[in-house]
Image: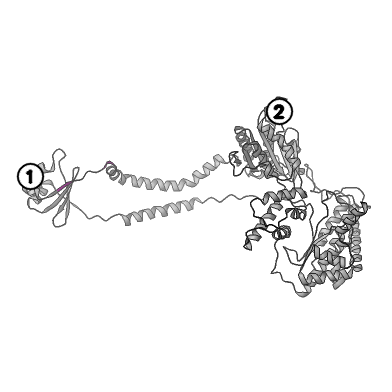
């Protein structure tokens, strides 16, 4: 398998979020009954079992005191708690107007008899008095209220959700939030994009400067670019530089299964933003709701189309002095509705490209701020070995290198960790448990050696940096080649050499072993796709000519039916014929290279079987020893001749 780092467009599949299931009413009733029975049982167990107390009259109390049978009398208001000397208890009531001693003397109790009885007065506090009076009535009411609350909790929750269903789910980052604040200093590269957005920052800071001269700042800014190029980060940086509230949400959060909810959320979002003005509203993945209308899917009442209509109305309804900027991000700007892109709405488009070598070094420096680096770390070398990496890929690279260092109990990240992380981000971790038989190891070695040798001999192929037969991800081995200089354009000759290089492993297996394995399957897919793109997209076929028969991102539906192809059967046959011709010529070219350099092929394969991995320096020594000049030396020799 060959690994070649190039710009690759990636698609992000929208992932819908499932709402949590609400508990059923029957479950709530069952739980409420169980809780009620549990409380009643606990009360019955914990409540003290009181013995029955005899109620006596004052005359009987007087007789008992006269007979010397009473030990003590406790007075609590009108109630008398009587304790006899034999341990029994009784209760009685006295008159309100008179004291107990007067009442007992009226019943013939002599003072000396009364003096032998302990009499105490208990003053009850207001709280305990009222609690004792109210609790017997209040406790059943509280239990019934709790039971009703348990039954109606779900109904109440559903009602509250209905009231908030049409509200916006935007998350706001306040300008005072220093933890989540991002500025242009935190965004490396994208120099042209930052220059475009500085006007937005200046308008939010000082709108009078623009309004006085009659200028109107763009109401909408559309950020487009490959995934991971920093669209969301750049939007947050604009808000951080301007010091204004930042409302962030995804385009998919507008759309629900109920008609009108998305439009309601759009209205609520813009009303909230206007109340917080100056502010920035950022809609990520706007293609989820902003796709072209009139596709015939969903009819005229399609909820997504109604939401888009509301967005168009809200953006067109801004007054010139309203300091609300709408920013959006997408990597599929080709599918957006034209009304969304017209002047007055998203009339400023900022394109974010993949970072070049210097930008990658700056991005790596930012991501390395909080990571202790060893003395041998050279981020420039890492930036050179990562062409085609996005900002998100570089962040993952730095994070993976820190994880590797921590896994080996080291306190600093070394250069070796960064180099290993490049391959891990591209292809996945090493599969050391994936053991090959000796014969499979030999086949893999010749396969990767075929890729490397063809790339080293053909003049327009990129130089090889590493060869390995250690399994990574789904690849049993890989050949890593990187361009000498980063290119924005590729020529027909370079594509033809790339196809031949892809077929190098296939040809090597057939030459050496007289048989073909499943190893070259991915190489064949890549080579065939590249050959078809040359014919149908880039006009690199003499038989077909300069005609674009297919597009990069597929066709967009404009309310019409979509055919599988837009060309006739005869043109399709010519395309197949041209693709086969390109593949056959590349096969013959690779076979010629490997046949003429069979000795070098054997030397590379033997070394791979011994060490499993060959780095660039060692690989170039093998080439030089067999009379092949490496690509970098060839380029240097050309420059010396020109000088």
For label 1, the SS is loop
**In front: 175, or 362?**
362
Pointer 2: residues within 10 angstroms few (<14), some, or many (20+)? some
Residue in the picture at 55% in, 41% down: 162
Q: Could you tell me residue 419's position as x and y percent?
A: 73, 59
Of circles 2 and 1, which is in front? 2
- Splitting the image into 4 quarters, where does residue 169 fall? top right
Residue 127, compared with residue 575, is above or below; it is above
Q: Quadrant of the N terminus?
A: bottom right
Residue 69 magenta: no
Q: Marks 2 and 1, how far apart in space?
A: 105 Å
Residue 120 magenta: yes
**In front: 144, or 234?**
234
Residue 42, compared with residue 80, is above or below; it is below
Judging by the rendered image, the residue that carries numbered circle 2 is: 210
Q: Is residue 281 left or right of residue 296?
A: left
Judging by the rendered image, the residue that carries numbered circle 1 is: 107
Residue in the picture at 13% in, 47% down: 57
Residue in the picture at 71% in, 36% down: 198
**Contact, mark 2 vs mark 1 (Cβ under 8 Å):** no
For label 2, the SS is helix
Q: Earlier in the sequence, mark 2 or mark 1?
A: 1
**In front: 218, or 384?**
384
Q: Is residue 175 left or right of residue 349?
A: left
Residue sitting at the far right: 542
Whether residue 333 is visible, yes or no, is yes
- Splitting the image into 4 quarters, where does residue 224 fall? top right
Q: Could you tell me residue 395's position as x and y percent?
A: 68, 52
Q: Could you tell me residue 174's position as x and y percent?
A: 59, 39
Q: Which residues are magenta?
A: 119-126
Residue sitting at the far bottom: 438
Count of labels in the image: 2
């Amino acid at each position: 398998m060959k690994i070649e780092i190039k710009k690759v467009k990636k698609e992000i599949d929208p992932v819908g979020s499932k709402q949590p299931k609400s508990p059923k009413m029957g479950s709530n009733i069952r739980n409420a009954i169980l809780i009620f029975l549990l409380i009643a049982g606990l009360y019955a167990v914990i409540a003290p079992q009181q013995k029955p107390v005899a109620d006596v009259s004052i005359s009987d109390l007087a007789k008992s005191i006269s007979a010397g049978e009473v030990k003590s009398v406790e007075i609590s208001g009108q109630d008398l708690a009587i304790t006899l000397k034999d341990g029994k208890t009784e209760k009685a009531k006295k008159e309100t107007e008179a004291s107990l001693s007067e009442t007992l003397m009226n019943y013939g109790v002599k003072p000396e008899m009364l003096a032998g009885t302990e009499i105490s007065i208990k003053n009850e506090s207001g709280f305990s008095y009222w609690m004792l009076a109210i609790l017997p009535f209040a406790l059943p009411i509280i239990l019934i209220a709790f039971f009703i609350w348990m039954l109606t909790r779900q109904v109440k929750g559903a009602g509250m959700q209905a009231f908030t269903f049409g509200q916006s789910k935007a998350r706001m980052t306040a300008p005072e939030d220093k933890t989540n604040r991002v500025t242009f200093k935190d965004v490396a590269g994208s120099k042209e994009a930052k220059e475009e957005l500085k006007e937005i920052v200046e308008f939010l800071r000082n709108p009078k400067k623009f309004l006085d001269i009659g200028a109107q700042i763009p109401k909408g800014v559309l950020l487009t670019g490959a995934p991971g190029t920093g669209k969301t980060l750049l939007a947050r940086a604009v808000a951080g530089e301007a010091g204004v509230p930042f409302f962030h949400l995804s385009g998919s959060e507008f759309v629900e299964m109920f008609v009108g909810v998305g439009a309601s959320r759009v209205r609520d979002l813009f009303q909230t933003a206007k109340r917080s003005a100056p502010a920035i509203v950022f809609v990520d993945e706007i293609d989820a709701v902003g796709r072209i209308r009139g596709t015939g899917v969903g009819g005229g009442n399609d909820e997504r189309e109604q939401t888009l209509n509301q967005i168009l109305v809200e953006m067109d309804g801004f007054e010139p002095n309203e300091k609300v900027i709408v920013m959006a991000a997408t990597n599929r700007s080709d599918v957006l509705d034209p009304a969304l892109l017209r002047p007055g709405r998203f009339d400023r488009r900022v394109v974010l490209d993949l970072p070049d070598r210097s930008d990658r070094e700056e991005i790596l420096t930012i991501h390395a701020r909080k990571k202790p680096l060893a003395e041998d770390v050279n981020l420039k070398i890492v930036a050179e070995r990562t062409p085609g990496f996005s900002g998100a890929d570089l962040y993952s690279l730095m994070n993976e290198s820190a994880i590797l260092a921590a896994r080996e109990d080291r306190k600093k990240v070394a250069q070796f960790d960064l180099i290993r992380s490049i391959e891990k981000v591209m292809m996945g971790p090493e599969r050391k448990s994936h053991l090959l038989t000796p014969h499979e190891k030999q086949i893999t070695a010749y396969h990767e050696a075929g890729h490397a040798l063809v790339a080293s001999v053909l003049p327009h192929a990129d130089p090889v940096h590493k060869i390995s037969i250690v399994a990574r991800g789904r690849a049993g081995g890989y050949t890593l080649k990187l361009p000498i200089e980063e290119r924005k354009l590729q020529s027909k000759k370079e594509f033809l050499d790339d196809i031949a290089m892809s077929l190098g492993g296939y040809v090597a297996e057939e030459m050496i072993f007289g048989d073909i394995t499943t190893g070259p399957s991915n190489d064949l897919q890549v080579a065939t796709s590249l050959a078809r793109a040359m014919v149908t997209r880039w006009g690199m076929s003499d038989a077909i000519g300069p005609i674009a028969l297919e597009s990069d991102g597929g066709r967009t539906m404009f309310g019409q039916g979509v055919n599988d192809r837009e060309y006739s059967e005869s043109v399709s046959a010519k395309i197949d014929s041209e693709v086969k011709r390109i593949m056959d010529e590349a096969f013959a070219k690779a076979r010629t290279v490997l046949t003429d350099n069979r000795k070098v092929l054997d030397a590379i394969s033997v070394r791979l079987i011994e060490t499993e991995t060959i780095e660039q320096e060692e690989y170039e020594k093998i080439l030089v020893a067999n009379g092949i000049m490496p690509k970098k030396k060839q380029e240097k020799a050309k420059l010396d001749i020109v000088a």
